[in-house]
Amino acid sequence: MSVNEGRTATSRGWKPTQVYAMAGICLAIGLVLGYLFRGSASDATSTAATARASSQGQTAAPTQMPSLDDMKKMADKKAEPLLAKLQNDPNNSDLLNQIGTIYKATHQFKDAIGYYQKAVQANPGNNPARTDLASCFYYEGDVDGALTQLQQALTYNPKDANALFNLGMIRWKGKGDTKGAVEAWNRLLKSNPQLDQHKKAEIEQLLTEAQSLKVTN
C-alpha cells in the first residue's frame, strides 16, 4: 500500500486505525509494488500513530487488524457512491480506476482486477489503471499476466517510471530473471533523468543487489 493510497482511504472516511491496519497487511504480502514512486505507507502510518499518541500523552497501542471480510465490507461501502455514478457513465475509465483502487487498497484483488480491466478497456492508455492491474495480477499469482500488462503500459508510455520499476521487480521476484530486472531498471534511470537523488539511489541499490545475484547464479 502506498502513502497516496493511505491518504485516499483516510479522505474517503476510513478511520485512521483501519488505515494503519491495512498498511500492516500490505507488509505481510511481501512485495509492495511501486513503493519507490508512491512511498511506504507503513512508515507514514506508524509514524502518524505514534505522533498522535504522543501528543495525547499516551503510548501507542497495537492495532487489531480487520479481517479480509471486514475489509471487503469497508470497500463495498466506500465504493457505493462511485458505483451509483458508474450506472450513468459505465465507460468512465477514471471512475472505474477509482473503484478498482478502493478494492486494491483493501486487498480485494479479484474485485479490483475486474474494475481495472474495464478501465483499460474503456481507455487503453490509462497507465495508472494498467499498472495497478498488473500489481493485482501479481498478488493473485498470475506473474505472466502482470508482465503482459506492464509491457502494454510501456507501449503507451515507454518512460513510465512505475511500469518500469514494477517490471523489474516482477521479473526478479516473480521469474527469477535478474538480467531482465537490471535491464528494466537501467532503462528507468536512462529515460527518467529527472528522478531525485534518493530515488536514484534506491534503484541503484536494487541494481547492485540484482547484479551480484547474476554473478553468483
Image: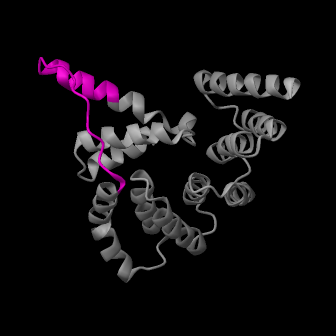
Give the total number of marks visible in the rendering: 0
Please state, as top left, top right, bottom left or bottom right, where the C terminus lies in the image: top right
Indicate yes or no whether the magenta region holds residue 65. Answer: yes
Q: Which is more toward the observer, 13 or 106?
A: 106
54 on left or right of 119: left
Q: Position of residue 122 (x, y in %)?
A: 56, 74
Q: Residue visible at 24% across and 39% down?
A: 17
Residue extending furthest toward the bottom: 88
Q: In front here: 5 or 64?
A: 64
Q: In this view, does 207 lie above or below 167?
A: above
Instruction: State the residue at coordinates (50%, 39%).
Output: 38
Compared to 115, does 151 lie above or below?
Answer: above
Q: Which colour scheme is used?
A: one colour
Q: Is residue 135 magenta?
A: no
Q: Residue 131 appears at what percent x and percent y?
A: 60, 54
The quadrant in which the N terminus is found is: top left
Residue in the image at 26% along x and 29% along y:
62
User: Residue lying farthest left?
Assistant: 56
Identity of the residue drawn at 36% across and 54% down: 68
- Examine the image and state in which quarter residue 141 appears: bottom right
Is 75 placed left or right of 216 in the picture?
Answer: left
Q: Where is residue 92 in the image (x, y as percent from the top left)?
A: 46, 73
Q: In this view, does 115 lie above or below 88?
A: above
Q: Look at the image and give the residue range highlighted in magenta.
A: 46-68
Q: Quadrant of residue 85?
A: bottom left
Coordinates of residue 187 in the picture (x, y in percent): 78, 38
Who is closer to the viewer here, 167 or 29? 29
